[in-house]
Image: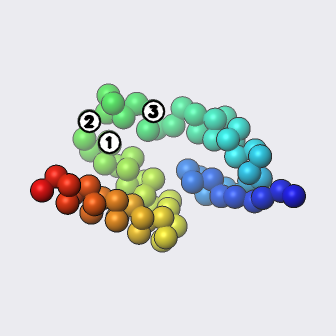
């Protein structure tokens, strides 16, 4: 039986069997591919753009991970 899943990059709905192919073909050369050469404002814009595409539950997970990382640096 097929399982319907959501692409975490674009939010599109796909069969789980085809999700990895979709990501490779549709998002393989994304705007985040050149982040190592991008300056800080471009990096921030890319991160915020990806964050806005997350569900509320995933946003909460990211916030928790960031808070945890911040605690480790103190």
The CA span between labels 3 and 1 is 12 Å
The residue sitting at 41% across, 69% down in the picture is 60
In this view, 18 is above or below 51: above
In the rendered image, residue 51, in percent from the top left (x then y), is placed at 42, 58
Neighbor class of circle 1 (other Cα within 10 Å; few <14, some 14-19, many 20+) is some
Residue 26 visible in the shown view: no
The residue sitting at 77% across, 53% down in the picture is 15
Q: Earlier in the sequence, mark 2 or mark 3?
A: 3
* CB within 8 Å, label 3 to label 1: no
The answer to whether 60 appears left or right of 24 in the picture is left
Identify residue for label 3: 33
Select label 2 or label 3 by which is in front: 3
* CB within 8 Å, label 2 to label 3: no
In the rendered image, residue 2, in percent from the top left (x then y), is placed at 83, 56
Select label 3 or label 1 by which is in front: 3
Residue occupying the far left of the picture: 74
The C terminus - image quarter: bottom left
Neighbor class of circle 3 (other Cα within 10 Å; few <14, some 14-19, many 20+) is few
Q: Quadrant of residue 42?
A: top left
Identify residue for label 2: 39
Identify residue for label 1: 42
In the rendered image, residue 4, in percent from the top left (x then y), is placed at 75, 59
The CA span between labels 2 and 3 is 13 Å
* CB within 8 Å, label 2 to label 1: yes
In this view, 21 is above or below 17: above
């Amino acid at each position: 039986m097929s399982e319907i899943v959501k692409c975490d990059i674009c939010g599109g709905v796909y069969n789980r069997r085809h999700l990895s192919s979709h990501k490779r073909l549709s998002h393989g050369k994304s705007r985040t591919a050149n982040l190592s050469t991008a300056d800080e404002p471009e990096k921030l814009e890319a991160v915020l753009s990806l964050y806005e595409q997350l569900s509320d539950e995933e946003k909460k997970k990211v916030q928790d991970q960031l808070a945890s990382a911040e605690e480790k640096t103190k």
